Image: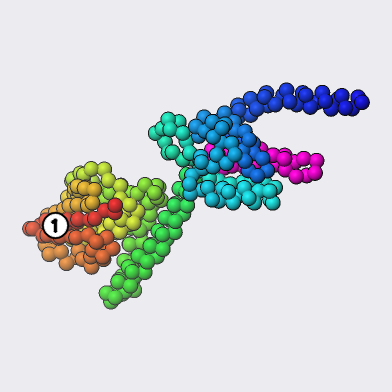
Amino acid sequence: MRHDADRRETDAAGEGDEPDFRRLIESIPHLVWEANPRGDWIWASRQWTVFTGQNSGRSHGYGWLDAVHPEDREHTLQAWQAASRRGHLAIEHRLCRQPGEGAESESYLWFSTQAVPRRGGDGRPTSWFGTSTDIHALYLMREAQARLLHELQRQGRNNLAVIRGIVRRIADTGQTAEDIVAHVDDRLAAMARIQAEVSREPLAGVALEVLIRDELSAHALPEPCELAGPPVRLPVEVAEKLGLALHELVVSAVLDGHERIGATWTVTPDHLTLVWHERARPGAPRTSGETLRGEMLERMLAYDLRATTVVTETGRERRVIIVLPLPA
């Protein structure tokens, strides 16, 4: 008889503690809920209501599914169907934020939803308790990492293709092995400089001004007499090719004894127009542009970047205008 009395007192205490227990739950930074073994919700915490705008009546049963992104509902239901067999629920899906709750942010955020059953004396689930935890920032970080990995792989493949092309084109010139090694080494050094800038912020692109200054500095040339244009960051695939083209321009200027190098540029949503100009120093031999790497420029600009290039020689001055389409 005493045992029965004790059990009744314990049950009564448990019933009286239930509201306090739920108030405690509503103080944690998660969306908390309870469902029956079929997945029908029978209770949702205040956090769920605040985030989704669903009151307890709307979330009960399968009403909570309305807050799940339409594209995620099917695999959410499949996860519930497998939960009883696996003994737990674990899924990542997007939940709808009610209007006005962080209105300037996205309407759907990524959540990790997990639940475990409370079992009866026969071992069968009598109810499920679950939480939905905001992992949106983590999900975006994982996406950024995946894009970064993809970009690094693309760069590796692209660099190998460029190196092979450079070696083949130089080998076809019939130069000595020593000259070929020098040419290849020179261009590999240029690629290394470009990749150093690319690797700083692979997803943000490379500043055009930085590409120009790096090449001039690598050849110990003085500060440009003019360097002007709006700030522009080039996509990686554009910066890699344009950087090598700039390298050819600088090398040609050095070999031809040109100085007073300058560059200006303008940008529209669709195109970059770069004007490169240089002047021969006094005493330098007059040239007609033979040493300008025409074939290399044509390959890098016309073929790879679909750019148009116009080279003009006036007296002791050389002017190169590059009109480069920009990716949308």
Report x, y in % for residue 117. 70, 41
Front residue of this view, candidates 310 and 79? 79
Residue drawn at x 11%, y 62% as measured from the top left: 286
Residue 38 image-quadrant placement: top right
Identify whether 8 is placed above or below 278: above
Tell me where residue 321 sits by quadrant. Answer: bottom left
Question: Which secondary structure is most common in the magenta stretch?
Answer: strand
Instruction: Report the side of 18 relative to 55 (left or right).
Output: right
Q: Residue furthest left?
A: 315
Lateral position of residue 94 relative to residue 117, left or right: left
| Residue at the image position 65 percent from the left and 48 percent from the top | 83
Residue identifier under label 1: 318
Q: Is residue 259 among the parts visible in the rendering?
A: no
Q: Amino acid at mark 1?
A: Arg
What span is in magenta? 110-137
Rendered-image quadrant of the N terminus = top right
- In the image shown, does 165 or 285 lie closer to the viewer? 165
Residue at the image position 23 percent from the left and 63 percent from the top: 302
Residue 105 painted magenta: no
Is 132 magenta? The answer is yes
Q: Left or right: 106 with respect to 21?
A: left
Quick check: 64 above or below 169? above
Above or below for 21 versus 305:
above
Do we see residue 66 in this rendering? yes
- Of helix, strand and loop, which one carries label 1? strand
Q: For residue 30, which quarter of the picture? A: top right
- The image shows residue 136 at horizontal and vertical percentages of 50, 41
Choose between 232 and 146: the one closer to the eye: 146
